[in-house]
Amino acid sequence: MSINNDATRPFQDVRMEGAHQVKMKILIGIPDGSSNIIMRHFEVSPEGHTPRHQHDYEHVVKIEKNKGIFVDALGTEHEVTEGMSLYVEPNTDHQFRNPYDKPFEFLCIIPNPEKNRCC
């Protein structure tokens, strides 16, 4: 079992190609004894965005603070606000953007990509 104070976990800049003004911290992960799932906290600054990307695993997203835009596989933009949750299927293009004036924060829960990597 692991009980963490999320405020003590440090944010790090997301350095993935196509990311702009995005920070992430791991709230629950392998060091906490969770070998199957990882919970991450993202903060997208005003005018920031994640890369448009896809991966071979599903994930769930919980909007924590303020609002942002979720861009789906068809390029349709959906405003998402705190209290909303999303499910993103594997191999589905998606992106988060923040055209607003306050930081946009969300949690993202994924399977451990290292454990679920094939071959």
Image (spheres, grey):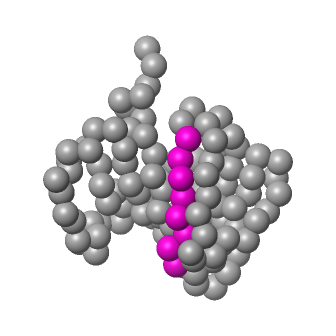
Q: Among all residues in the image, which is located at the extreme bottom?
A: 101
**Picture quadrant of residue 8:** bottom left
Main SS of the magenta segment?
A: strand
Segment colored magenta: 58-65
Image: 60 above or below 48: above
Dividing the picture into quadrants, the one containing residue 95 is bottom right
- Position of 85 relative to 111 (above/below): below
Residue 107 location, x and y as percent? Answer: 47, 62
Quarter of the rendering containing residue 85: bottom right
Residue 60 included in the magenta stretch of the image: yes
Question: Residue at 20% of width from left, 50% of height from top?
Answer: 32
Residue found 61% across the figure and 52% down from its top: 87
Q: Position of residue 12 (x, y in %)?
A: 37, 61
Expressed as whole percent of the image width and height from the top left, the position of residue 27 reads 32, 60
Up/down of 78 relative to 104, above or below = above
Q: Give the residue at x 35% y 65%.
A: 11
Taking the spot 53% from the left edge, 64% from the top edge, the residue there is 62
Number of marks present in the image shown: 0
* Residue 89: x %, y % from top left: 63, 41
